Image (tube, helix red, strand yellow):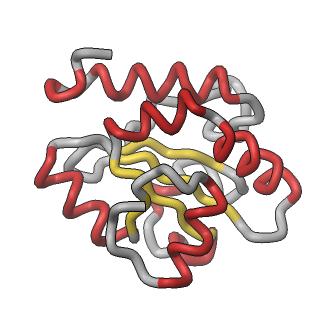
Amino acid sequence: MVGKVNAAVRDVAQEWGRNIDWHEYRQGREKAKLENKPIMVIMQTPTCPHCLSLKEKVAQSKAIEELSKHFVMIVLNEWEGKGDKDLGPDGRYVPRIVFCSPTGGTLKHIVNMPNSKNKYAYANLDALVRNMKTVSMAYPTNKEL
């Protein structure tokens, strides 16, 4: 983990992948603007069984680890993001993964299940990897993927 994060954020984030550069929410948004990188925000709770399952898959995925280099990566406990309605465009369920532009606007069209009430839920990594590639290709610094 390269980014400077407080101990609580570091502990939560490392569970999602030790070789991913995780950032606190505010710091990450600033970094995204400066580097013109999109943001990937994972909303979770520590005891949610679906969160735990997804966390294990993400932490073991070399594809996500590699793609994460093209993003500012943020993981938040659900209660930390309650003040930002853009982090829950279709509700407050967990886990959910929302992609944002470098300026912080939610990319509401980047969803896993367009016809579901939980559009931003990911149970398998294929869809997440596909969406990470789609988002990273939308920004000039990431055209090489």
Does 47 sit left or right of 68 as displayed? right
Q: Left of 113 or right of it: where is 51?
A: right
62 vs 44: above or below: above
Residue drawn at (59%, 74%), measured in percent from left and top?
Answer: 11
Residue 43 sits in quarter: bottom right
Vertical placement of residue 107 versus 94, above or below:
above
Horizontal arrangement in the rendering, residue 61 relative to residue 84 (left or right): right
Q: Could you say which is closer to the camera, residue 7 or residue 35?
A: 7
Quadrant position of the C terminus in the picture: top left
Q: In the image, is residue 12 above or below residue 17? A: below
View extreme (top): residue: 144
Residue 119 falls left or right of residue 49: left
Q: Residue at image x 35%, y 39%?
A: 69
The picture quadrant where one finds residue 99 is top left
Horizontal and vertical percent position of residue 75: 53, 61
Q: Position of residue 102 (x, y in %)?
A: 23, 46
What residue is at 50 percent from the left and 84 percent from the top?
7
Residue at point 43%, 32% (across, down): 67
Where, quadrant-wise, is the N terminus in this rendering? bottom left
